[in-house]
Image (cartoon, helix red, strand yellow):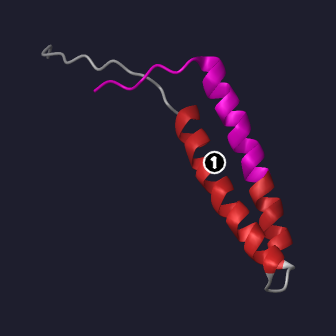
Amino acid sequence: MPAPMVADEVRQACRIHARLLDAFITLTEQELAQLAPGFAEESLMESLEKMRAARKSYGALGGVVALEVVASNAA
């Protein structure tokens, strides 16, 4: 099954979102490292989980390149 076509501007937007999420994930991890156990820690852990899932989605969409594979018998 061929990969879906994704417009260049959509891929570019996905890469921007992924880059911003990477930065925010890093900031959140730094903040989390300074927290004592409790509600704030749990809340940030949940946020990290959601951001990482979103990052994975944006990264996958941003890297999609539709290629048509053509077999050749030429030697």
In terms of image quadrants, where is residue 11?
Answer: top right
How would you rate the neighbour count of disc 1 (Cα within 10 Å): few for under 14, some for 14-19, many for 20 or more?
many
In terms of image quadrants, where is residue 41?
Answer: bottom right
Give the percent coordinates (x, y) of residue 68: 33, 18
Q: Is residue 56 magenta?
A: no
Return the residue found at the far front: 39
Give the percent coordinates (x, y) of residue 62: 58, 33
Q: Which residues are magenta?
A: 1-23
Left or right: where 51 falls relative to 61: right
The count of marks equals 1
Compared to 34, does 4 lie above or below?
A: above
Left or right: where 7 falls relative to 50: left
Compared to 72, does 62 lie above or below?
A: below
Give the percent coordinates (x, y) of residue 55: 63, 48
Q: Quadrant of the N terminus?
A: top left
Q: Mark 1 = which residue? A: 55
- Residue shown at 80%/63% (left/top)? 28
Main SS of the magenta part reads helix
Left or right: where 45 falls relative to 68: right
Q: Quadrant of the C terminus?
A: top left
- Residue shown at 38%/21% (left/top)? 67
Say what amino acid the circle numbered 1 marks: Arg
As rendered, which of 63 and 54 lies closer to the eye? 54
As rendered, which of 67 and 53 lies closer to the eye? 53
- Residue shown at 68%/42% (left/top)? 18
- Residue shown at 72%/38% (left/top)? 17
Compared to 48, does 4 lie above or below?
A: above
Give the percent coordinates (x, y) of residue 73: 12, 16
Q: Is residue 7 magenta?
A: yes
Q: Secondary structure at mark 1?
A: helix
